[in-house]
Image (cartoon, helix red, strand yellow):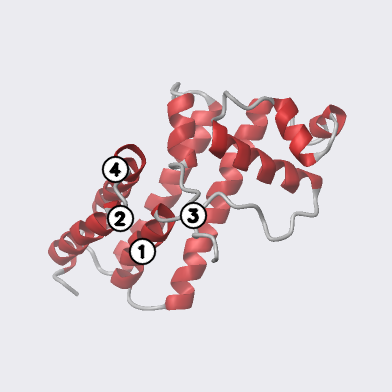
Amino acid sequence: MAKAIWSVAPRARASETRERLLDAAAMLFYEHGFHAIGLDAILEEVGVTKTTFYNHFASKDELIVAVLLDRDERDMQAVREEMARRGGSARDRILLVFDVLDDWFNDPDFKGCLFINASAQFPNPNDPVHQAATKHTQSLHAMLVELADEARAQDPALLAKKLCMLIAAAITLRQVACDPAAAHTAREMAVALLDRSLGGG
């Protein structure tokens, strides 16, 4: 079974040491938390020395920032590729985000959102880790603004913000309440929101 689009899965091929460090760190951080995993565990997983690590990253925190930015880029690219593959109207592509969520929520390896986990474990908004985690929300909002504008929403930014709130609520409901239907419920609410904002078309 293919991994869900937003699952924290390694690259199909990670030949470069930096990529292997990013992939291993992402998996370990997702599984155990950012503070519970030390640098030694990551190096052991990848099979490299500290000298090699410091050739790529100045610190563990710098690695965490790089992991979050890498995951943001890969996740957004993956969902855009899925939109291109399936096609459809801008409205259809907005709703596709909730289908992607549903697949992810039902992945047996689902352990919440890496970005929400990071922002919770690094709560200072001035912390580079917190800022890197926030970038994912900004990326998602920007994509939804584009789609809302294409769909001729009267206020694309506001519609995108409301959709982001639905997505965040669905993730929280799935993560905290373990509700497997959270994405489906959020999708129904998104349909109603789009009907009001786009006149049903």
Secondary structure under badge 4? helix
Q: Which numbered disc, 2 or 1, marks the residue that appears first in the sequence?
A: 1
Secondary structure under badge 3? loop
Disc 2 to disc 1, C-alpha distance: 7 Å
The answer to whether mark 2 and mark 4 are in CB contact below 8 A is: no
Q: Which numbered disc, 4 or 1, marks the residue that appears first in the sequence?
A: 1
Disc 3 to disc 4, C-alpha distance: 17 Å
Residue located beneath label 2 in the image: 183
Count neighbours of disc 1 (C-alpha within 10 A) and say few if under 14, some if 14 to 19, many if 20 or more. Answer: some
Above or below residue 130? Residue 139 is: below
Q: Which numbered disc, 2 or 4, marks the residue that appears first in the sequence?
A: 4
Q: Tell me the mark number nearer the camera, choosing from 3 and 4.
A: 4
The answer to whether mark 4 and mark 1 are in CB contact below 8 A is: no
Q: Which numbered circle lies on residue 88?
A: none
Residue 60, position in %: x, y?
68, 27
Disc 2 to disc 4, C-alpha distance: 9 Å
Q: Which numbered circle lies on residue 6?
A: 3
In this picture, residue 177 sits left or right of residue 35 = left
Residue 55, position in %: x, y?
83, 34
User: Tag 1: residue type?
Assistant: Asp
Confirm whether residue 88 shows in the render.
yes
